[in-house]
Image (cartoon, rainbow, N blue to C red):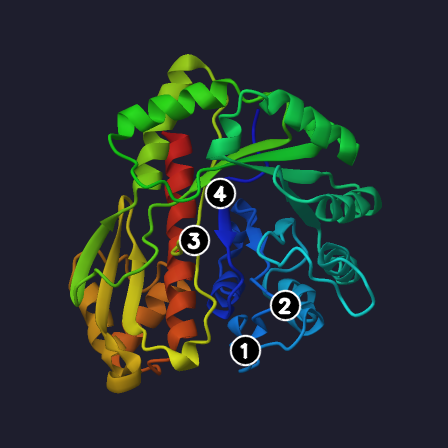
């Protein structure tokens, strides 16, 4: 059974990420179905939900969510996307009493966006009830997102049946995302691939889901241990996927669509960056690793050091060329001094845009091999 798209990137919907989507080639955009996670918001610490485009933290959940649908329409368009509110404080409600899920999908609907709600097995009744409202109105089903721990549960069939019944959705109206998160250790890859093959084989109704995806990452939660200059981090989620595909083909088991967390760890800090001293870095995805070009902290040494970092990428023999993507063109131009050195959001869109373009090509090449 062929999935609707070839790649499922999970995005935190920070400014750099949606600017990266805006700059994607039409071919790449047509090949991906993103999971868009609404940025974290806590009623207890709203200052941690800093909005870089507005230049200030939202004061209320209403403020935090007010521009989400409009930005999805402007940066992604009206094409299908998964929308997940797992990072919103469960007790958050808008001034008018609505659940954030209800507000978001009302707003996305008004913008004409073909959004599909993401529901996990751990979400509370109010979240599920609000998702059901969207399912009934939009008739697009939903996306079931299942963690590695939940997928290994002996009573998974019963849990899945209960949720499908509650939502009033058949398996062929539902997307199944197997979410590995960020496993501590992918290696040995062949052993991990064997474990996943066994779990996938036992996923309920495996061949009936509208689409079936696998997402995960080996990107570190912090770059603090990465030295200045050029370093390489293995992209173990991609290496694992290739091993898994080989095994599943032999066993004639349904192959999931590849997905990842792009250049993020699943748990990303939402602290106000005005009060931190992040180091300059460029995250540049390669087929089996990330090249990390890292400098000094931008508070004391400025963003001008990105010219040197971009030159390191150009000289590394790993550079894809300035016609590969808008991000690669920006890296080239920055190295030559013809564009500004930007800020943190600039280098997030650069890293994300290159990653999305490169992974889309790699996935297509693997499928054709």
Residue 251 sits above or below residue 156 on the image: above
- The residue at which mark 3 appears reads as 356
Question: Are the residues at dot 2 and dot 4 in contact (C-beta closer than 8 Å)?
Answer: no
Residue toward you, 25 or 75: 75
Residue toward you, 89 or 64: 89
How many callouts does the rendering have?
A: 4
- Label 3, label 1: how many angstroms apart (C-alpha)? 22 Å
Residue 75 sits above or below residue 156 on the image: below
- Lower position in the chain sequence, tag 2 or tag 3: 2
Q: Nearer the viewer, mark 1 or mark 2?
A: 2
- Label 2, label 3: how many angstroms apart (C-alpha)? 33 Å
Residue 3: % across, % down: 57, 33
Quarter residue 225 falls in: bottom left
Q: Residue 7 bears which disc, if any? A: 4
Quarter residue 59 falls in: bottom right
Question: SS of the residue at dot 3?
Answer: helix
- Lower position in the chain sequence, tag 3 or tag 1: 1
Residue 102: % across, % down: 77, 56
Q: Nearer the viewer, mark 2 or mark 3?
A: 2
Q: Residue 53 bears which disc, if any? A: 1
Q: Nearer the viewer, mark 4 or mark 1?
A: 1
């Amino acid at each position: 059974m062929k999935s609707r798209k070839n790649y499922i990137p999970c995005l935190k919907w920070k400014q750099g990420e949606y600017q990266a989507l805006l700059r994607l080639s039409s071919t790449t955009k047509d090949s991906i179905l993103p999971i868009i996670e609404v940025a974290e918001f806590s009623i207890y610490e709203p200052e941690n939900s800093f909005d870089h485009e507005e230049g200030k933290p939202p004061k209320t959940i209403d403020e935090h969510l007010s521009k989400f649908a409009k930005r999805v329409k402007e940066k992604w368009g009206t094409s299908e996307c998964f929308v997940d509110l797992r990072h919103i404080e469960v007790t958050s409600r808008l001034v008018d009493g609505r659940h954030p899920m209800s507000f978001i999908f009302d707003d996305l609907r008004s913008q004409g966006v073909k959004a599909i709600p993401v529901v996990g097995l751990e979400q509370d009744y109010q979240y599920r009830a609000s998702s059901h409202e969207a399912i009934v109105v939009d008739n697009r089903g939903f996306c079931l997102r299942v963690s590695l721990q939940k997928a290994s549960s002996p009573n998974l069939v019963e849990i899945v049946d209960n949720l499908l019944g509650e939502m009033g959705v058949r398996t062929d109206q539902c997307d199944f995302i197997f979410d590995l998160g960020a496993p501590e250790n992918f290696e040995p890859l062949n052993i991990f691939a064997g474990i996943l093959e066994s779990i996938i084989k036992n996923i309920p109704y495996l061949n009936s889901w509208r689409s079936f995806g696998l997402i995960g990452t080996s990107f570190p939660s912090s770059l603090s241990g990465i030295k200045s200059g050029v370093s390489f981090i293995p992209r173990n989620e991609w290496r694992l996927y290739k091993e898994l595909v080989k095994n599943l083909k032999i066993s004639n088991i349904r192959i999931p669509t590849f997905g990842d967390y792009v250049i993020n760890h699943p748990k990303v800090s939402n602290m106000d960056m005005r009060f931190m001293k992040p180091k300059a870095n460029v995250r540049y995805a390669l087929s089996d690793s990330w090249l990390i070009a890292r400098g000094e902290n931008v508070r004391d040494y400025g963003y001008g050091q990105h010219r040197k970092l971009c030159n390191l990428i150009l000289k590394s023999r790993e550079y894809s060329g300035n016609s590969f993507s808008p991000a690669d063109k920006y890296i080239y131009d920055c190295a030559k001094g013809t564009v500004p050195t930007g800020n943190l959001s600039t280098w997030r869109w650069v890293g994300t845009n290159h990653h999305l373009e490169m992974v889309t090509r790699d996935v297509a090449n693997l499928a054709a091999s």
